[in-house]
Image (spheres, rainbow, N blue to C red):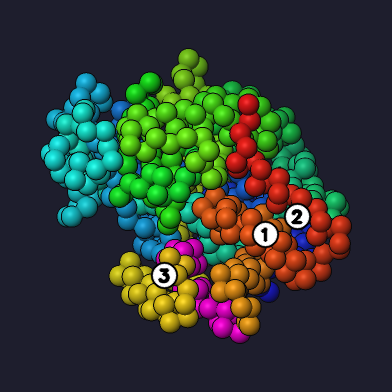
Amino acid sequence: MEFSFFYREEMITEAKQTDFDLLVIGGGITGTGIALDAALRGHKVLLVEKNDFAYGTSSRSTKLIHGGLRYLKQLEFALVKEVGSERAIVHKLAPHLVIPEKMLLPLREKRGYGSLLTSFGLKLYDWLAGVTGKDRRLMLTRRQTLRREPLLKKDDVKGGALYAEYRTDDARLTIEVAKKAFAHGALVLNYCKAERFEYENGKVAGAVIRDVLNEKNFTVKAKVIVNAAGPWVDTLRKEDGSLQGKRLHLTKGVHIVVPRDRLPIRQAIYFDVAEDSRMIFAIPRGDKTYIGTTDTNYSDDIDGVQTSREDAEYLIRGVNESFPGADLKLRDIESSWAGLRPLIHEEGKSASELSRKDEIFESESGLISMAGGKLTGYRKMAERVVNLVEKKYLPPFKVKGSLTVGARLGDGAFINYKSVRKYLLALKKRFRRIGLDESHAHYLVNTYGKQSDLIMERFNESDEPVLELRLLLAELWFAVHYEMVGSVQDFLIRRTGRLYFDIHSVRTFGKDVVDQMANYLKWSEAKRDSEFVALEEAIHRCVVFKQ
Ligand code: FAD
């Protein structure tokens, strides 16, 4: 059975007939991470996701695998140590997808911490995370800083620092973890919503699941249930009647995307916004630069979070103050996304002050909920939950302890970053011969790793004359057959990131994608039309801001 919609009915039948050890609710990085950890230990796992994998926060982050420098300021040493150390591990697990990126931190007159404190802070950051050799922080003079980034406002730069982080694609990381869990025997279903719990002797023993696509309910049995529903965690705790004590505090974070030539920074930069001293990132990705994030309290509809004009203007002002030559305007924004941080509420603390630490809540009924945390720390978070499950609810099965540290991600995974670069060079050569721009080779390798081989085989079989479209359709074929894609947005947002980073291709080829998917998945005329309308709406949400 492949990880494809072609086998969805079979999977649902299996879900109905199996007694699971563990039911995981939520297909973000937290839920897929837990499913993988438990499956590797030999447990029978079912994961259900009400929309697409990574539909929630896990496709809307800053897309960094980072230690969280600013958490040092909040004296969260344990958090910095854990996520800092995890960076190198996650890079090893997926070197094509978690890519080293030096971050530039400019130091400004009368702002921030000054050179001495920054130097000490970064040294501590490296030390906590075990960073060694060339990756250790490097302090820069004013001249060196401006040489590295000539676009910075010259008047007040007094120096800078370079430190090591990694960039990634959050949704791709999530789908690769989901695929790995499936490969190790977990049943992993998108578009299946946990509606309510089933109890035996007052303890959770299963759930009623709604197959959202066919509008039918079915029941599943599980010895243990983990609620990894991100911003929706409290909705499920409420359903369980156990929403007491600590609760979630949602904060909204927005990113905007502009053409690289409108903010042609040479590398990723972490800088402060003058008006409120908050730190934001500007990160180059292909021929775009993305900027974020905001951090504001949110109490509106969780499924309807959107960038507002105020969010976009704040980020534009922040950029223009630090890079005055850019003179960015709202109309330069090509795309955007907004996500919700599922943080734990702390009385009297502002959005930015809330801890990013993960926490586990256990209810009287045995429902285990996990909230907070970071994309970066997903592996350790999963380990903690599955350890708890084994300690209190299930005896360890075949193996003791987590095995995820050795579970490389992406079919035919690379052994290291050097082999990624070698593969990329060969693909670039091939692309030059075919007449495709080299940037497509970068995109393909960073998105799919060695799975690009399968995509290129399909590409070679096609006679579509427009090469860009031929490549896109080969990717679609791969996504439909191996990545459980069930809607056009699954493909254009969460498998390829195109809606954010190449919206032009979505506008140009969106209809071709809808038509081809309709053929693959045998959609009716009405379904085809509704997918097209939904895609238009998704484009609209990225570019037209809420007042
Ligand atoms: P989600 O990704 O939201 O997943 C929960 C899933 O549960 C959703 O897909 C939802 O559809 C599903 N669900 C809900 N209810 C049900 C139900 N009843 N039945 C079935 N499924 C259900 N972290 C980093 O490490 N690096 C960063 O650069 C970074 N940047 C960030 C920037 C922003 C703006 C934000 C908001 C967060 C950022 N984070 C970052 C944090 C990180 O993104 C989150 O910690 C992480 O993605 C949370 O994942 P999750 O799986 O817990 O939640």
Q: Image check: 520 left or right of 464?
A: right
Quadrant containing the N terminus in the rendered view:
bottom right
> In the figure, 483 relative to 538: above or below?
below
Q: Position of residue 291 (x, y in %)?
A: 43, 40
Residue linked to disc 2:
532
Q: Are marks 1 and 2 in contact (CB under 8 Å)?
A: yes
Residue at mark 1? 510
Q: Amino acid at mark 3?
A: Glu
Task: Give whichever of discs 3 and 1 has the lower sequence position.
Answer: 3
User: Label 2 is placed on what type of residue?
Assistant: Phe
Query: Residue at (36%, 58%) from the top-left corner?
Result: 99
Range covered by the magenta-colored residues: 442-461
Residue 284 drawn in magenta: no
Q: What residue did someone put label 3 on? A: 438
Name the one closer to the observer, 256 or 71: 256
- How many angstroms separate mark 3 from mark 2 (CA)? 30 Å
